[in-house]
Image (spheres, helix red, strand yellow):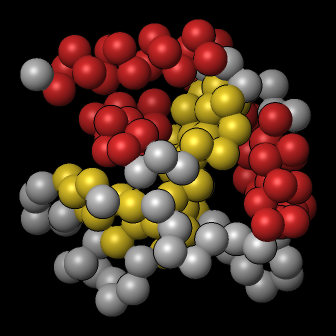
Amino acid sequence: MARMRGPDELVVSPPEQPLDPVVKERLAEELARCPDLAFAHLVQVLVPARQERPELALFVWLRPSALRSLRFALNLVSEAVAHVLPEGDFLDVLVLNSAPELLIEVERARSLLVENDPEERARALSAASANED
């Protein structure tokens, strides 16, 4: 379990109640088709000051070229998620590029769902590790 300290403490951990295996596999397949997605983690997030129970969240890292058209890239990811989840279910999608300081915490949860661009993931992790010191 990883914690981000501060007034809105964020606790990131592996999902205690993960998605149905078939849904999770379909989600990974759909996300693998998103051309701007470098990698994604499906984790459990809790903000103790705001919620009583943790919720599933999808943390995505977009390829740098996608950041010029962030809305388009995020729409593709959101459509993939909506296409797979059963009606009435939802999943928060968070762009890690906008909060790279969370990358190390998310990685510690060991919940990588899809990795479309291993080189970009290695670059992002290297940069995040250098900034953590």
Q: Position of residue 34 (x, y in %)?
A: 81, 33
Left or right, residue 25 beside residue 98: right
Q: Where is residue 22? Give x, y as percent.
A: 87, 65
Residue at horizontal 30%, vertical 23%? 128
- Residue, x 77% and y 60% (percent of image)? 24
Residue 90: where, in percent of width, then height?
A: 68, 73
Q: Position of residue 79 (x, y in %)?
A: 82, 53
Q: Is residue 28 above or below residue 96?
A: below
Quadrant placement of the N terminus:
bottom left
Quadrant of res 56: bottom right
Classify the position of the C terminus by image quarter: top left
Residue in the picture at 69% in, 38% down: 114
Q: Nearer the viewer, residue 75 or 54?
A: 54
Residue 116 lies left or right of residue 106; in this view the side is right
Q: In front: 86, or 43?
A: 43
Residue 7 visible in the displayed image: yes
For residue 38, what is the image quadrant? top right
Q: Quadrant of residue 21?
A: bottom right
